[in-house]
Structure formats: structure tokens, C-alpha cells
Image (spheres, coloured by chain):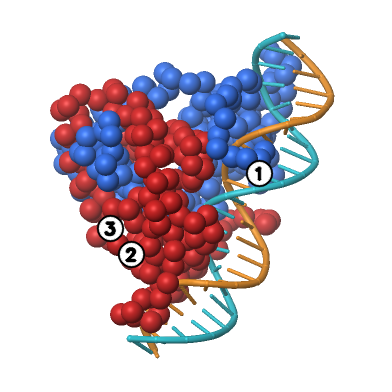
Chain colours: A red, B blue, C cyan, D orange
Amino acid sequence: MVADGLEPEQLRTYFALMESVSVLHHAVEQQLQQEGPLSYVQFQLLARLADAQGPLTMTELADGVVYSRSGLTHQAGLLDKAGLVTRGPSPDDQRATLVTITDTGLALVAKVLPGHVQVVRELLFTPLSAKDLRALDDTVGRIRDHMRARPPRSAAPRKRRSAEPAATEE
Amino acid sequence: MVADGLEPEQLRTYFALMESVSVLHHAVEQQLQQEGPLSYVQFQLLARLADAQGPLTMTELADGVVYSRSGLTHQAGLLDKAGLVTRGPSPDDQRATLVTITDTGLALVAKVLPGHVQVVRELLFTPLSAKDLRALDDTVGRIRDHMRARPPRSAAPRKRRSAEPAATEE
DNA sequence: TATTGTTATACTCTATAACTATA
DNA sequence: TATAGTTATAGAGTATAACAATA
């Protein structure tokens, strides 16, 4: 494959990265589904809320997890319906919705976490030395920060779109 | 977050990895959609076929890209309908379907690749030094090989399943 | 009997656009 | 006018199960 502008090594790294994370993601989804049931997105949202030790607004919750507002509304609705979170108005900003994790939600995270961690350790960390891990942590952290520094990310429904595809049908 | 069995550093690395690849995946999907239109899965399939310089069976094509046979059949059907691949019986094994990329398919890969590579370089490789890249390539390659060495991965609808979920229905 | 692949179907996720309400 | 969030809706992706055919 001729990847103009990218070294062969980079291309190989890229594909290996994508495949690895795909497999990991798939394994993790299965584990969460069986022991939750929870999707990875839902798990992330709950984990964030658990970590925050207090309510978060929808916008805060969205950042880095979801790419459209409506998607988050949908997921939050499911979590709410399942009794894992509650939603209410914010005292500070009447437009905002504050999401709070319930005890049931906390319990579910606690229930699911051991199995989750086990899958991650087995799949991702088993083949790594302590040195590998340090380097990976540093590198991936840098990559994430770089990506975070760029576009809005959380949800910007404004403008966009142009360029017509080559498709002849639809 | 108390992640029993996983060091805090590992947990942080894991989340950073998942978030980074999620952003990268999302960016890449957008680029492929606009310039293709193509999904990432479809791009992978075409890239594999282009790389193989010859037909591949459905099973070979599935490996590492898709996790169910029907999913691949669906995607191959779309690519076929779009004129990007052709499918036919295998002379060796009458059960197998051989998938071949067409000139149109090759052209589309060529058309899409520069923009694709640009997104990857900008998002993934810009913040990395040459040393980082070498380490990342090595580490990720090892991770992928480790994952490949494990379960069947391509598509094994046979047996499996046990352990009853908490679900009350089915 | 095991494997390759397809079909039918159901479900989940995501995103766009339109809309409401508050800042 | 811009921002926070919801709703409705449509589209794509994925997986399970049942099936047909070949090894």
C-alpha cells in the first residue's frame, strides 16, 4: 500500500493500533454486556460520574465520550430509565441538566469493574514490560492531549458539510 | 476509581488509549465518508484486498476486521453493489466465495488514501518524536500479536456461551 | 459432522434537523 | 444572538438464528 506522506512504519503502527483497540473494545463490550448489561459508552458515562463525586452537566459528561448532543440525551435517558442516574435542573444555569449517579449506578460500576479490569489487563497489558507501559502511558497521554487541544469535540451542531461524494446511487 | 487488579497508571493508560483511538476513528470516519463515501470497515476491506493483490475468501477478509459472518456478508454486498468488488465461487473450495477488488475499487482507495493519511498523521503522529514512534510501533505490534494469538476472532458461530447473565429474558 | 457463506430479522447506536428555553 | 438540552426521525452497523451447500 502506497501511503504518500506517511512512512511505512507509521502506517503499520496505525493499523496495528486500530486493530488492537478494535479487538479490545469488542472484548470489553462483551464483558460489560454480560455482567451489566452496559455498553462501553454507558460504562464510561457512569465511570465519569462516579469519578466526579458529584453531578455533571450534559455538556461536561459528553466531552470525549460522545460526538452529538442527541446521542448523549439518548444514553442518559437509558441510564435514567435503568435507575442508574438521575437528572435535574441546575441551580446555576437554568438551561443545564445536572446528571447524578445513583447508589444503584455506583453499585453496578463496582460490580462490573473487576471483570472489566481483568479483560483489559489480560488483553492489553499482559504482553507489556514495565518499561513498555511507562512509554505507552506517556505517549498515549501526549496523543490524547494533542487531540483534546484541537476541535470542539463535545458537540457542535453548527455549520459544516460540503463536498459531494462520488457515489452514483444511494 | 478503584480498579482492583490494575495499577492506576494502567487504568489511565487504558482510558487515554480508548479515548484517543475513539477520536481518531471518528475523524477518520468523517474523512472517508466525505471523500468516499466509505466507512472505516469498508476502507479496511478494500485496503486488504488491494494489498493482497488477488482475491481473498470471505473468511480471510473477515479476520481482524469484522466479528460476525453476516456482518461481512452485508458489507461485501454493499461494496459489490457499489462496483468496488466482485464476488465469485472459488475453484478450490466450492463453499468459499472469492472477493476481488475492481479497478474502480482500487481507484477509490487511491483517491481516499491521501486525505486519510493526512488525518492520521496530523492527529496521531504529529505529537510524537521519532523515538516515540519506534517504541509505539514495537509495543502496539506486540499487543496486536498477543491479541491475534488468542481467540478465533474471524467468526465462530459455533458453541460457546455458558455463564448465565443477569438478564431475565432472552 | 464441520465449515463456508447467505438471508431474515431485530436491535442498538448515531446523527441531523427542528424546536424550546434560558443566558 | 448564542448556548443547553430534548425530540423525532432516519440511516447505518452489527449480531443471532435458521438455513443451504460443500468438505
**Vertical arrangement, residue C13 with respect to residue A155, above or below:** above
**Vertical arrangement, residue A84 with respect to residue A28, above or below:** below
Q: Name the kind of residue labelled 1 in the image.
A: Leu
Q: Name the kind of residue labelled 2 in the image.
A: Pro
Q: Are marks 3 and 1 in contact (CB under 8 Å)?
A: no
- Answer whether residue A131 is visible to the viewer in this image: yes
Q: Residue D12: image x %, image y %? A: 60, 51
- Please give the residue where the numbered disc 2 appears in the rendered image: A55
- Please give the residue where the numbered disc 3 appears in the rendered image: A53
Q: Residue A141: image x %, image y %? A: 22, 46
Please state if B57 lies on the left or on the right of A77 as rendered: right
Please state if B84 lies on the left or on the right of B148 as rendered: right
Mark 1 nearby-residue class (10 Å; few <14, some 14–19, many ≥20)? some
Q: Name the kind of residue labelled 3 in the image.
A: Gln
Q: Residue at x 20, y 31 (%)?
A: A133
- Which quadrant of the rendered structure holds the C terminus of chain B? top right
Looking at this view, is A124 or A30 the one in front?
A: A30
Q: Are marks 2 and 3 in contact (CB under 8 Å)?
A: no
Give the Cα separation between the discs numbered 2 and 3: 7 Å
Give the Cα separation between the discs numbered 1 and 2: 44 Å
**Vertical arrangement, residue A169 with respect to residue B109, above or below:** below
**Vertical arrangement, residue C13 with respect to residue B68, above or below:** below
SS at circle 1: helix
